Amino acid sequence: MNTTSSDASDGTGSAVSHDMLANAIRALSMDAVEKAKSGHPGMPMGMADVATVLFSEFLNFDPKAPNWPDRDRFILSAGHGSMLIYSLLHLTGYEDVTLDEIKNFRQLGSKTPGHPEYGHTAGVETTTGPLGQGLANGVGMALAERMNNARFGDDLVDHYTYVIAGDGCLMEGISHEAASMAGHLKLGKLVVLFDDNGISIDGSTDLSVSDDQLMRFEAYGWHVSQVDGHDAEAVSAAIEAARSDDRPSLVACRTKIGFGAPTKEGKSSSHGAPLGTDEIAGARENLGWSAAPFEIPADVLKAWRAIGADRAEAHIAWTQRYDTAEAETRKAFDAALSGKLPAGAEAAIKELIAKHGEEKPKLATRVASQKTLEVLQPAIPALVGGSADLTGSNNTKVGGQDAVSAGSYGGHYIYYGVREHAMAAAMNGMALHGGLIPYGGTFLVFTDYCRPSIRLSALMGLRVIYVMTHDSIGLGEDGPTHQPVEHVAALRAIPNLNVFRPADAIETAECWLAALQDENRPSILALTRQGLPTVRSGDTSENLSAKGGYVLSDASGDRKVTILATGSEIEIALEAQKTLEADGVTTAVISMPSMERFKAQDADYRKAVLGSGTLMVAVEAGIQQCWDGLIGFDGIFVGMNSFGASAPAGDLYKHFGITSDAVVSEVKKRLG
């Protein structure tokens, strides 16, 4: 076996060859997939050489302190090849990934699920599997690194983001948006190692794609190179060159999927299924690996553990720099990394709410959101905003927010361009990195483009705030292509996601505060284009929107009717209440800015708000689907059951029968 630049000592002075180090990854991957009778052995076997070079020579990590702030980030965007990262974590000494966990690959409750999951396994930086998402997360992490560096300096923040991506990641459309953004912002500390094996599930990639990936990424403004992915010295030289370039880098590593398998090497048959006992036996022979299944020779394991200890020395050096940094810098750094809201943030919002209560402005909730941001931005240094080319429409930028640009990363606002996919995924990466609280805007209808990333925000429990404006047919003349009728219901179906649809300026500020205070859940703010009156009155000291639902206007006596509404339809509900009360029908109006928050309240509170034995009515300019659980199948729904149309907002509400008269008519018809 040839010695290479990534040969390692076993601790006794003897060298363990690169081939043996890489083969340990291959063997564990083959064995774990075979035992599970499920998984993807081909990619880990093909990229074992590249990963060995990366982890042994370049990646700064500490198995004993997986989350130290200035570690390099490693993202396995091709998450189906999860045994690659699990093997590396086990071999380098991460306590979470024991040999028993390797043996329990893909089993219930194991630390080695089918695809890597953030928060589940130490050393896994993000949840991957939906192809291209990890690559886009990496762009967000690399951007966060530069932004934190601009705030706290090289001594505290100076690290790389490495991504292993496959053909599938680069085929997915999100890769275009993310790569274009990275090139524009010159994220030079981002290095993507492309597993250029020419194979996808269907077979050769020639069946479906003929892109020249090097030319493509060069056009984005990236530094590009191509190497034999099984030549350790060439891989090492390519990574070194990538690190020294001030552009993001793509290193195309030409590999053989299922490397070493006698009949399945280079074939799609090694991609997504166990190799089988005979094929594994042949691979062991080809690789010169004589150890039994799940057995790592002592010298190889010692060499890998020595690599883990060696790469952790960067942590020791960083700790020394941290300890000698100025006290104020350390304090600000620690505060940003903690994710906690500064003490003045809540007070600033409450002061704004009190002002709205006195002045009772009529504002579109998108404008009310902007006014909330005006008080939040100076109070929360970590707050970073942006928009997918709709800044003026989303009202996401306020005074004092300088733009982030290539070479100038100290700002607080990002112009994402028309890149909704990449914006949402990059915000996930920023939240994962730490030190920043990201929010970003587009039209609510374009949550269709953001949905995969929103789902991953919720799955990972990330505080990412999506400012989604033009929330209903109320946007008017742009018509049904831009009018979201099913989107709020679809978003409410995602677990662990706050969906807020505030009714006025007060509720908007309350929803912002609730979103910021929820550190383990993303939030949607669905905001109007049209102006809405202030509907809240009286004491505004308690954040009622944080409860999800509350009695906005009670009945004059024992309730006969309970009207529930959100957002712009609260005004309709209140008008209907006035008419019904005048006719002797005692009616209460419930504002329901967040169904998720309301359902999380205790039963007594929910019962007190909803009442019992009344006719239940829901009013929302969207589809009915999510309301049945609150109003029952005998309740009345006044809303949409079709797509919208192009017309002024007022005409549309009349055309589709979402009016106070329609509510009154339906109630009287039901009550007889």
Image (tube, grey):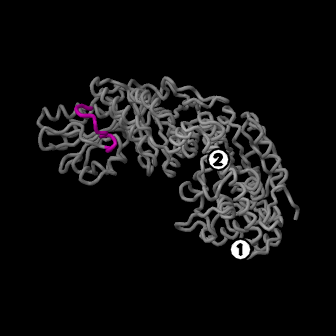
Judged from the image, the secondary structure of the residue bearing numbered disc 2 is helix
Which span of residues is magenta-colored? 536-548
| Relative side of 364 to 295, left or right | left
Q: CA distance from mark 1 to mark 2?
A: 38 Å
Residue 533, percent from left and from top = 30, 26
- Tag count in the figure? 2
Main structural element of the magenta stretch: helix, strand or loop? loop
Q: Residue at x 63, y 48 (%)?
A: 319
Dot 1 alpha-carbon crowd within 10 angstroms: few under 14, some 14 to 19, many 20 or more: some
> In this rendering, does residue 638 appear at all?
no
In the foreground, 211 or 513: 513
Dot 2 alpha-carbon crowd within 10 angstroms: few under 14, some 14 to 19, many 20 or more: few
In the foreground, 351 or 44: 351
As drawn, 64 above or below 302: above
| Relative side of 152 to 91, left or right | left
Residue 33, percent from left and from top = 66, 68
Q: Amino acid at mark 2?
A: Gln
| Residue 320, disc | 2
Judged from the image, the secondary structure of the residue bearing numbered disc 1 is loop
Q: Give the quadrant of residue 114.
A: bottom right
For discs 1 and 2, the disc positioned in front in the rendered view: 2
In the foreground, 622 or 93: 93
Q: Give the quadrant of residue 402.
A: top right
Residue 336, percent from left and from top = 52, 40
Residue matched to label 1? 295
> In this rendering, does residue 307 appear at all?
yes
As drawn, 532 above or below 632: above
Residue 516, percent from left and from top = 43, 40
> Farthest residue in the right direction?
2
Q: Amino acid at mark 1?
A: Glu
Q: Residue at x 50, y 36 (%)?
A: 439
